[in-house]
Image (tube, rainbow, N blue to C red):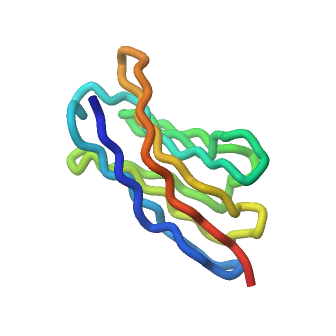
Amino acid sequence: QVQLVESGGGLVQPGGSLRLSCAASGSTLSINGMGWYRQAPGKERELVARISRGGSTNYADAVKGRFAISRDNAKNTVYLQMNSLKPEDTAVYYCNAAKFSGANFWGQGTQVTVSS
């Protein structure tokens, strides 16, 4: 089992920045990819960014050039630096960890609200 705890969400004005963190605990040695997803009210959960254990990344088109995902394998932590935030980035952001076996684990989510 893997436990994920997110932090760093909050209220920010348009154009501002936030940094999300997700710390993994438990059987972390078998974690392959980690990532961030988001779900806005009335919408389906969608991929924001993912990073492999080796550091390969992929991003949703909507956040390319504004968000950056990074990972500290020694600390079992993944980060999401979000810059130039827009109101449409408002959502609950969820951390995900995928094991080599294919099992997936989710954090409890952290609210990000972009509003003036």
Image quadrant where residue 30 sits: top left
Q: Is residue 8 above or below residue 107?
A: below
Asked if 103 appears above or below 65 in the picture, the reply is above
Q: Is residue 89 left or right of residue 23?
A: right
Q: Position of residue 70 (x, y in %)?
A: 43, 51
Query: Of residues 100 and 4, which is closer to you in this image?
Result: 4
Residue at 54% in and 56% down: 68
Q: Position of residue 5 (x, y in %)?
A: 35, 52
User: Please, which residue is most extreme toward the top here?
Assistant: 101
**Residue, x 41% and y 33% (percent of image)?**
105
Foreground residue, 95 or 77?
Answer: 95
Total marks in image: 0
Identify the residue at the far bottom of this view: 116
Residue 29 lies, in percent from the top left, at 22, 30
Q: Report the side of 115 relative to 38 (left or right).
A: right
**Residue lying furthest front in this view?**
42
Query: Horizontal and vertical percent for residue 101?
Result: 36, 14
Quadrant location of the C terminus? bottom right
Question: In the image, what residue occupies the spot 45% across and 49% down?
Answer: 108
- Quadrant assignment, res 14: bottom right
Q: Does residue 54 lie above or below 14 as drawn?
A: above
Q: Looking at the picture, tell me which residue is in the foreground, 4 or 99.
A: 4
Q: Where 58 falls versus 66 (above or below)?
A: above
The N terminus is located in which quarter? top left
Q: What residue appears at the point 68 percent right and 82 percent down from the top-left corner?
A: 13
